[in-house]
Image: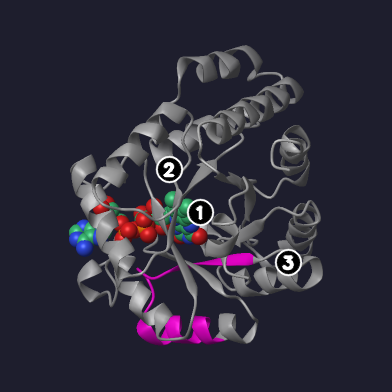
Amino acid sequence: MKIIDIINSGKPTISMEVFPPKTDDKFNSIMQATEEIAALRPDFMSVTYGAGGGTSKFTAEIAENIQNKYGVPTLAHLTCVSSDKDKIDSVMNDLQSRGIENVLALRGDIPQGFDRTKCEYHYASELIDDIRSHGDFCIGGACYPETHPESPTSMKDIENLKIKVDKGCCFLTTQMFFDNNILYNFIYRVREAGINVPIVAGIMPVTNAAQVKRIREISGSQLPSRFIRIVDRYGDNPLAMKQAGIAFAVSQIIDLYANGVNSVHVYTMNKPEVAKAIMDNISYIIK
Ligand code: FAD
């Protein structure tokens, strides 16, 4: 099933992101975690591709397993910057043979010391034609409510986003954010720029204090004071921090639905118990 049809169904949707193992020996435990998340029956699940040093070789396998075993439609991430056309071609053939219909077209982070002049791909938008040449895929893209870190201005970033959408992205998933007003403001500016595709809000439940430092490094997200107070108060108490982090994410999600943002994507960090707690807390809201 195509993600765009799920998003356009009119009902509030909840989807979950998982990532493949970094090493082969972790494959079984991560497959188990992804299955436990799939068993919660989110509207769809996405599987990352080589993100954060993870391997890309299991993305298609995990996505296929979730789809076949649990009937949950999947979105396979695909990055291009350190790839070439032959590699993209072979990944797309693999996805197609496994019945995956949805791809998140990404540039990927640029590895340190990488010579970009030798790349076949420079931006995610260049990947879109190559995905389309493989058939009728539903293609999504990433967007950044707080601006992509490499972009000189937020307006420039939105102009570049429009190129990606005009190329054929039919929905966008946001980078994580912790202040919903930032998203509402972003949506306003994106619509003003003539981008009309659905925007899926990416929510990261922060369940331990160490995550906060990493989030700042990778996303540059602003952390509202009410969130910082939670980390200050409960950061040294793992169980309390987990409970408070889940409650914070749930309150963000409910506020999003209440304000008309109908599609929410949870960065689960492969934690089934966190995904379950969120599903339990919104069960009547998404009915
Ligand atoms: P692009 O859309 O290409 O944009 C990158 C930068 O280039 C931006 O600053 C943009 O403004 C600029 N730009 C775009 N087009 C042009 C143009 N034509 N001319 C000039 N400038 C331009 N990484 C992974 O490795 N694996 C994953 O699975 C993964 N999943 C992700 C999922 C989501 C929802 C998000 C938000 C990010 C994900 N990432 C993943 C991280 C992502 O790869 C990085 O943020 C990366 O730095 C940018 O990727 P992009 O596809 O947004 O790039």
- Residue at image coords 62%, 74%: 60
Quick one: SS at disc 3? helix
Tag 1 and tag 2, C-beta contact below 8 Å: yes
In the rendering, at what x and y percent does residue 194 appear?
26, 52
The mark closer to the camera, 1 or 3, is 3
Report the quarter where the C terminus lies.
Answer: top right
Quick one: SS at disc 2? helix
Q: Amino acid at mark 3?
A: Ile
First in residue order: circle 3 vs circle 2: 3
Viewer-proximal residue, 125 or 262? 262
Question: Magenta segment: does it hold 86?
Answer: yes
Kindly give the residue lying farthest to the front in the view shown: 10
Quick one: SS at disc 1? helix
First in residue order: circle 1 vs circle 3: 1
Q: Which residue is mark 2?
A: 218
Q: In this view of the protein, can residue 149 be seen by the observer? A: no
